[in-house]
Amino acid sequence: MFVLDRTNIDKALDEIEQEVYERGNKAGLEQGRLEESHRLLERLLSRKFGENDAREERIARLDTDAVEDAVELIFDVENEPDFWAAVEASTNAR
């Protein structure tokens, strides 16, 4: 006959709960970093090229690696269309 060992079940459930918490916490931190990176890029672009309401959607589509590339590229271009072309080329090269 099969007998449930409550101690082992509780231990397994605690381990599962801890793993779920850690994964959720990590995902939340990564999302927070990405959002902060988006805000930083927006500020840099605004300072260099002026305000532009249309760029928010483009920035939101960038992942962490693309934002890092974009921050580097901003210093190498003269205008915003060239900036976005360089970002796209960099993203496609990956």
Image (tube, grey):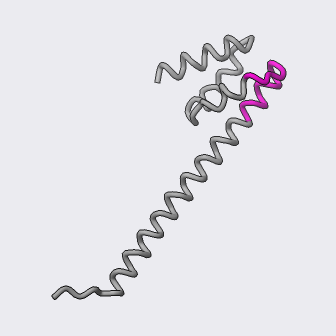
- Give the residues in magenta: 40-54
Q: Position of residue 91 (x, y in %)?
A: 53, 23
Quarter residue 81 falls in = top right
Q: Is residue 45 magenta?
A: yes
Task: Identify the residue at image location x=30%, y=87%.
Answer: 5
Task: Identify the residue at image location x=54%, y=55%.
Answer: 26
Q: Position of residue 14 (x, y in %)?
A: 44, 75
Task: Identify the residue at image location x=49%, y=58%.
Answer: 23
- In the rendered structure, the answer to whether residue 38 lies left or right of residue 8 reads right
Q: Predominant secondary structure in magenta?
A: helix
Q: Position of residue 34 (x, y in %)?
A: 63, 41
Task: Identify the residue at image location x=58%, y=29%.
Answer: 66
* Of the pair 26 and 70, the residue shown nearer to us: 26
- In the rendered structure, the answer to whether residue 56 lies left or right of residue 61 reads right
User: Image height check: is 69 above or below 83?
Assistant: below
The number of callouts visible is: 0
Quadrant position of the N terminus in the picture: bottom left
* Of the pair 93 and 76, the residue shown nearer to us: 93
User: Image height check: is 65 above or below 32?
Assistant: above
Q: Residue furthest left?
A: 1
Q: Is residue 28 magenta?
A: no
* Of the pair 74 and 13, the residue shown nearer to us: 13
- In the rendered structure, the answer to whether residue 37 lies left or right of residue 88 reads right
Q: Position of residue 85 (x, y in %)?
A: 61, 13
* Of the pair 90 and 13, the residue shown nearer to us: 13
